[in-house]
Image: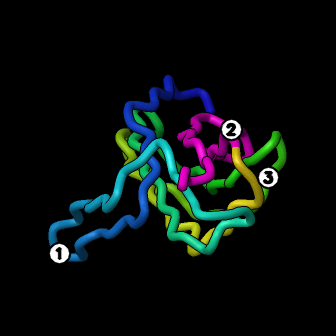
Amino acid sequence: MTEALRVTTALVCDQVLRDAMTRKWTLIGVFDRVAVERFPSPPTGLGVYFRLEGLAGPHSWQIALVFGGASVMTSSPMQIEPEGTQQLAGYLGLQTFPGPGRYAVDLLIDGKKVASAGFVVEQRRK
């Protein structure tokens, strides 16, 4: 990547939708902290949205859920269309969190981490 890449937005949410006609993104339930009843947690939806400037294709991208310094789940690689501003979003499906702590969803471009959206998972107080 020789472009001057700049990440302007990195958000974690419950769900990410894209309207086929308008191509607008809808982010539902944006968060940076989650309280769960117990560990491992019941499955919960996990989406992510990144906005990048200065990146022109072709490149491949993927997202990885990271906990305790290790990748818990990685998506299949997807292709970036050739344009300067990119809005990349993914849905990691229903995820179970094994324990409390800081989690991250990393954005990988051509296998290299370029951005991260972090969040905390904690046990709900009774």
Q: Is residue 90 left or right of residue 39?
A: left
Q: Is residue 20 left or right of residue 47?
A: left
The image's mark for residue 71 is 3
Q: Secondary structure at mark 2?
A: strand
Give the residue displayed 59% in from the left and 27% down from the top.
2
Please tell me whether residue 17 belongs to the stretch shown in magenta.
Answer: no
Q: Which residues are magenta?
A: 101-126
Of circles 1 and 3, which is in front?
Answer: 3
Q: Secondary structure at mark 3?
A: strand
- Is residue 24 among what the camera can see? yes
Q: Could you tell me which quadrant the C terminus lies in?
A: bottom right
User: Residue 52, image x and y in percent?
Assistant: 42, 38
Look at mark 2 in the image and give the residue it sits on: 113
The answer for how far apart the CA atoms under marks 2 and 3 are is 12 Å
The amino acid on which the numbered mark 2 sits, given as a three-letter code, is: Lys
Residue where numbered disc 1 is placed: 21
Q: Element under label 1?
A: loop
Circle nearer the N terminus (1, 2): 1
Quadrant location of the N terminus in the rendered image: top right
Q: Residue 13, position in %: x, y?
A: 42, 56
- Alpha carbons under labels 1 and 2: distance apart: 31 Å
**Identity of the amino acid at label 3?**
Ser
Query: 48 above or below 115?
Result: below
- Identity of the residue drawn at 76% across and 60% down: 98
